Amino acid sequence: MLEKRDFYINGAWVAPAKAHDYAVIDPSTEEQCAVISLGDQADTDAAVGAARAAFDSWSQTPREERVALIKKLAEIYDARSEEMAQAMSMEMGAPIELSRTQQVGAGSWHIGGFLKAFETFSFEKDFTATEKTLLEPIGVCALITPWNWPMNQIILKAIPAIATGCTVVLKPSEVAPLSGLLFAEFMHEAGFPAGVFNMLNGDGPGVGSQLSVHPEVDMVSFTGSTRAGIAISKAAADTLKRVSLELGGKGANIIFADADPKAAKQGAIRCFRNSGQSCNAPTRMLVHSSRYAEAVEMAADVAKNTHVGPASEEGKHIGPVVSEVQFNKIQGLIEKGMSEARLVAGGLGRPDGLNRGYYVKPTVFADVTNDMTIAQEEIFGPVLSIIPFETEEEAVAIANDTPYGLTNYVQTQDDDLRRRVARRLRSGMVETNGVGFAQGSPFGGYKQSGNGREGGVFGLEEFLEVKAVSGWAAG
């Protein structure tokens, strides 16, 4: 069993001010795989103090030096990618193949995107012949990240913050902290100055809340549940710090009559990926009535043929969900769905042959209406709800009838229809016909899916203040 109690503060690994052991559970086995310590106020104060002390010099460091350090980090990240893949697979249950390709790959993809954006990014803009607008780092940033895509979210926050001249305190999810600890090793090996990057473990009510209210923290960037995002916003209000939120989702996948014949199959596969633990998953499949029966059959077939197994198992499959808490929540919502709609695949309990581990059956409900619990709540498991529609107007109305607004999907061969519907969907992202987003594309949502954007130039701008200076040049 791994013992990882220390925190990374001011360029060194330090013991917690007060030991508070926390067991990290391998969701594939339900057995303890590591022990960490949760921080308390003294640890939070030390980390924030280190970041504050480092800010002045780091914010004035030439951009070329910052870029060189990030490039060094990228080399280390790639060289030690197998360690990172194993850590994420063990801590949150991602199948090792998915962990190596998509979980680790998301990190390297975003580092590359930020470096590309940084090449042409300007921190100064001429507003008039004599007036200059300056973009300056906001200051000390608290980065609070989730367990479902650990490196994706850590890098989407840490790299743009540091690249723009901010200093940071990272609090990874205590449920899946091993990847964050390893990332801190990478930062140390890359040679970032002491205090620029700090990391401590803790839970939301503890370190998370302490960072949210801390008077020396200038910004909180949080990814997680909408409930927690609301709590952080309220806690941060007293100090008027900037709060950037990437929260939940309940994506609609609209399949029109002329969509690709495999649209329903691909939508179900996408829904079940990462065991359904993605905020941008297409968990509501809206299908034109002429294709509805076919789509239900196709999605049910995907569910029945999706292999579920341990994260360590090679090959394409889905692993467990992250924890007992998540497992029980998902089971409760599946049970609710069985009282609301027609179950066509999956259901309660673990898949056959698995009697230990937080494994959930890939589940499909048909004849769902959008007022049902399973159509409104973010289940965050491999559960798909299928809803029929007749007209474009009805499809748009159903898709927008949700408190969330992160990612929606449109499937049609009619380009005018595709673009028209994309404009009307109230979400930060709309993926059409299975075409993925480009490197550096803005990631974020409307409504209760949060505010702000991550990725590329948009992610850099999140960590900057705007300053107007008159009389910059004689005129």
Image (cartoon, rainbow, N blue to C red):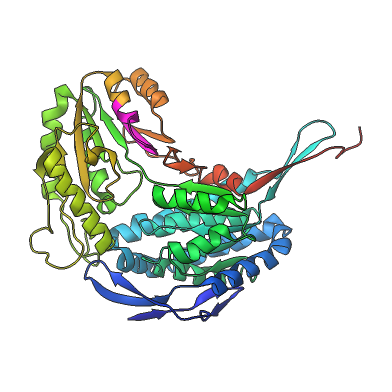
Identity of the residue drawn at 14% across and 38% down: 340
First to last magenta residue range: 398-410
Identity of the residue drawn at 24% across and 54% down: 329
Based on the picture, tell me whether residue 258 belongs to the magenta stretch. no
Left or right? Give the position of 282 relative to 75.
Answer: left
Above or below, comparing residue 135 to residue 148 in the picture: above
Residue 140 in the image: state x and y as whole percent: 63, 59
Identity of the residue drawn at 41% across and 76% down: 36
Above or below, comparing residue 456 to residue 5 in the picture: above
Q: Give the mark count.
A: 0
The C terminus appears in which quarter of the rendering? Answer: top right
Based on the picture, tell me whether residue 399 belongs to the magenta stretch. yes
Q: Is any part of residue 112 visible from this angle? A: no
Q: Is any part of residue 330 visible from this angle? A: yes
Residue 245 in the image: state x and y as whole percent: 48, 47
Left or right? Give the position of 457 relative to 432.
Answer: right
Q: Nearer the viewer, residue 7 or 60?
A: 7
Residue 327 in the image: state x and y as whole percent: 23, 58
- Place residue 45 in its image quadrant: bottom right
Above or below, comparing residue 164 to residue 124 in the picture: below
Residue 148 in the image: state x and y as whole percent: 35, 56
Extreme residue in the right direction: 474
Q: Nearer the viewer, residue 18 or 279?
A: 18
Q: Nearer the viewer, residue 472 or 65?
A: 472
The N terminus appears in which quarter of the rendering? Answer: bottom left
Identity of the residue drawn at 37% across and 57% down: 103
- Place residue 37 in its image quadrant: bottom left
Q: Nearer the viewer, residue 247 or 435?
A: 247
